[in-house]
Amino acid sequence: MSLPPDSGRPGAQGRPGGPRRRPPRQVEVVDVKPLTPRLVAVVFAGESLAGFAEPTPTAHIKLFLPDTEGNVARPVVGLDGRLEWPDGRPTMRTYTPRRFDAEAGTLEVWFVLHGDGPAARWAAQAEPGSRAAIGGPGGRFSVDPTATSWWIGGDESALPAIATLLEALPDDVTGQVHLEVEGPEARIDLPAHAGVEVTWHDRVGEPGAALVDALNQAGLGDDTHFWIACEASAVRKARSYLLDDRALPRPQVTTRGYWRVGEANHPDHDFGED
């Protein structure tokens, strides 16, 4: 998501007898808002967003990027329900939508400007009128209504997902949020929750190291639920600690490897389960 949510893979295209896939929605940029030197919010709109499902917390969308001339490929649905791309499949990446405003018909997505990835380049140059296409939303995570304690961790790539999670937590929940970023200039205001304490960590050494250290020192009860998303190697260390060393039940542990050092297009289905 290199340090971004600039990762993903082409999604499954349906199967004979299976559900017909809806073609990606053609959208246009209507606003671009810098949040930090390395994070920008891009707001999309378009008639095709009518009927867009309200994203669940930490949900994801597929962003289909335009070609060098700004044109977005348009697929068609074949007789077997599969999506076909007569003009060639465009570059696609996976992101967490920050917010969808059904009344205004707008969808806000945050991009980490991490370097030379195709989505980061596009976001750095995006302006009103820029075009793209969006598929989704999707995602299988849901907040356990019986959980009363949470430990949430992530880096820049997880900021929009963590913001949606904070907004979804019940008022009586207590917990901690730990965020690892490049430095103080990368910190942003997150949705406030009276029972949740937010701690920022400046990145020192390997990506995710500060999060793993904070997790090891947390000293939380065995009833705590965990949601962690960051660099894939760090995610595996965190998951091993929680499931192997702490022997916590798997339903209490949600992990996502949003990106991996040295990998330009990390799979968007990396749950750290290997």
Image (cartoon, rainbow, N blue to C red):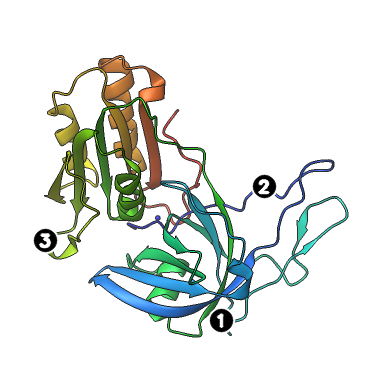
Q: Give the vertical position of 107 relative to 250 (above or below).
A: below
Between 201 and 18, the one nearer to me in the picture: 18
Residue at coordinates 33% horizontally, 50% vertically from top-left? 158
Q: CA distance from mark 3 to mark 1?
A: 35 Å
Q: CA distance from mark 1 to mark 2?
A: 25 Å
Which label's residue is closer to the chain start, 3 or 1?
1
Viewer-nearest of discs 3 and 1: 3
Q: Which mark is residue 12?
A: 2
Q: Name the quarter where the N terminus is drawn.
A: bottom left
Q: Dot 2 lies on which element?
A: loop
Which label's residue is closer to the chain start, 1 or 2?
2
Q: Is residue 248 visible?
A: yes
- Residue at the disc numbered 1: 68
Q: Can you tell which quarter of the image residue 51 is in?
A: bottom right
- Tell me the kind of residue under disc 1: Thr
Which label's residue is closer to the chain start, 3 or 2?
2
Q: Position of residue 179 (x, y in %)?
A: 20, 48
Q: Can you tell which quarter of the image residue 22 is in?
A: bottom right
Q: Give the vertical position of 231 relative to 93 (above or below).
A: above
The total of numbered circles placed on residues is 3
Q: CA distance from mark 3 to mark 2?
A: 40 Å
Between 45 and 65, the one nearer to me in the picture: 45
- Residue at the disc numbered 3: 184
Q: Dot 1 lies on which element?
A: loop
Q: Is residue 204 visible?
A: no
Q: Name the quarter where the C terminus is drawn.
A: top left
Q: Dot 3 lies on which element?
A: helix
